[in-house]
Image (tube, rainbow, N blue to C red):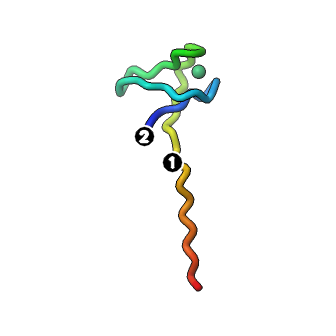
């Protein structure tokens, strides 16, 4: 799992509690969502 900057949308690596975007300096960091879409078919 990783973190993504909410401003520029780049991946941010950081320690817990000390997350800051190194590209734009934004402090709004969101958790990267795994793009795993579970499609359950109940046929
Ligand atoms: Zn950024």
Q: Which residue has dot 1 on it?
A: 34
Query: x, y percentage for residue 38?
Result: 54, 64
**Residue lying furthest right in this view?**
8
Query: x, y percentage for residue 12?
Result: 49, 26
Q: Nearer the viewer, residue 2 or 26?
A: 2
Q: Does 43 appear above or below 18?
A: below
Query: x, y percentage for residue 22?
Result: 51, 15
Quadrant placement of the N terminus: top left
Check disc 1 and report its element: helix, strand or loop: loop
Query: x, y percentage for residue 6?
Result: 60, 29
Q: Which residue has dot 2 on it?
A: 1
Seen at 55% across and 25% down, the residue is 28
Q: Nearer the viewer, residue 9 or 29?
A: 9
Mark 2 vs ligand 1: CB under 8 Å? no
Q: Does 41 appear above or below 14?
A: below
Disc on res. 14: none
Looking at the image, do the residues carrying marks 1 and 2 touch, with CB atoms under 8 Å apart? yes
Seen at 53% across and 55% down, the residue is 36
């Amino acid at each position: 799992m990783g973190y993504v900057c909410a401003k520029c949308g780049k991946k941010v690596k950081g320690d817990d509690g000390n997350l800051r975007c190194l590209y734009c300096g934004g402090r709004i960091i969101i958790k990267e969502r795994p793009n795993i879409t579970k499609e359950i078919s109940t046929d």
